[in-house]
Amino acid sequence: MPNLESNTAGIISPNPFWLASAPPTNSGRQIMRAFDAGWGGAVWKTVGQPIQNTSSRFGGLAWRGQKGVGFNNIELITDRTMDTNFREIAEVKKRFPNHALIVSLMVESKEEWKEVIDRSVDAGADGIELNFGCPHGMCERGMGSAVGQEPEVNERITSWAKEFSTIPVLVKLTPNVSDIVPHGLAAQAGGADGVSLINTVKSIISVDVENFVPRPSVGGKSTNGGYCGAAVRPIALHMVGALSRSPEFRLPISGIGGITDWSNAVEFLLLGASSVQVCTEVMLRGYRIVEDMIDGLENYMRRKGLECLGDFIGRAIPAYTEWGELDINFESVARIDPETCIGCQKCVVACHDGAHQCIHPGPEADSVPIVDEPECVGCNLCEIVCPVPDCIQMVQVDNGLAEVSWNEHLVRNLRIREKKGSHGYDMPE
């Protein structure tokens, strides 16, 4: 039986699946139901001075008939009193002592940070998460992403938290920056025990083209909100991977962003996360999705011969490199399986209109398309648009060329130019 126990910055949970700080963790009753369903941990919806939320606060992105591919919210932190939140935190921890309970916090002054951290510790929390990511409403008040976008402020407030806290401190980072690494390093410099990322992406989900108002509409007006859901996963994976592969960054990571099933969770773990946080998919489908996540992760670990999470956390990092280090002589071509091809011709259209015109119709209208392999550049577009799983595969071909990266090619040409005193530029062979 694989061991799913997770350790993120000293926060232990029976499995790596945590609920992210959001509506699904708004109350003790909700989190207790979630723990009963199988979630290993939960990050309490951000506690601070309670605010007034808007009525009409969510928006969804539909794509080809599928709702919720992307999700947007303009909701802020808790609208419940601190007394209520901390009483319920203590109740949850008393009932579920072996589950991870982390309290998300967002306040302004140093004195307020000390108060909420002291109360979190007294309530029995296993850790705290500093919300430096909210991209709307709170940032205008000098909190949320207004802190997360300023490394110096991030470091200073993190150092306050470490001064006051006797439990692990996680810093939740905003993706609304050009490079995540300096912000992770700022949290590290402030003494954080770990980071969590990503928070939501600043966005407008859609516009009502009939009434000329962005969504969600609040009395005929709207504002930018935080984008989340399956559509943000590629952004989240990039930022988690960027921190994990940074030689200067040494903190544990809790990965967040577009996780919908066990395989998504494994992607984050392979890129260095030791736990994952889920929000939007729970909002769309409920707490019980964790049952399939646990089963899927266990089956994956059995199939791969993995005994614990540590056996594969970060295993994809060595393969994540810069473009200039890729083998530019590597070559693959598209191969179409005639047994499974349904003759829809989608690959033909995509290749002719959006790629390199190397896939052509067969002799009959619904027959298997023909790949002109010498003209195929291995772009993968046909594989992406094909509706039949594994019907089109990209197959490596031996072109007789030695492996060489762009960076190696540049160095070689520089040496040749220095030797010849030439300004010529040779392409690799």
Image (spheres, helix red, strand yellow):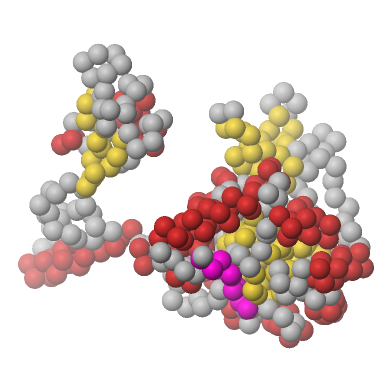
**Residue drawn at the location 47% of the way across and 69% of the way down:** 307
- The reply to whether residue 81 is visible in this rendering is yes
Secondary structure that dominates the magenta span: loop
**Relative height, residue 304 to residue 98 (above, below):** above
**Residue drawn at the location 13% of the way across and 48% of the way down:** 399
**Residue drawn at the location 83% of the way across and 60% of the way down:** 28
Task: Specify whether 78 is left or right of 216.
Answer: right
Q: Nearer the viewer, residue 359 or 158?
A: 359
Q: Could you tell me how many numbered marks the image carries?
A: 0
The percent position of residue 275, horizontal first and vertical second, equals 58, 65
- Does residue 4 show up magenta in the picture? yes
Task: Specify whether 429 is left or right of 328.
Answer: left
The percent position of residue 153, horizontal first and vertical second, equals 68, 74
Which quarter of the rendered picture does the C terminus lie within? bottom left
**For residue 304, which quarter of the picture?**
bottom left
The magenta-colored residue range is 2-10
Q: Residue furthest left?
A: 420
- The reply to whether residue 194 is visible in this rendering is no
**Relative height, residue 14 to residue 400 (above, below):** below
**Relative height, residue 154 to residue 379 (above, below):** below
Q: Residue furthest front?
A: 1
Q: Nearer the viewer, residue 78 or 286?
A: 286
Task: Specify whether 358 is left or right of 94.
Answer: left
The percent position of residue 303, horizontal first and vertical second, equals 42, 57
**Relative height, residue 280 to residue 143 (above, below):** above
Q: Residue furthest top?
A: 364
Q: Nearer the viewer, residue 226 or 24?
A: 24
- Does residue 372 show up magenta in the picture? no
**Residue drawn at the location 89% of the way across and 68% of the way down:** 87
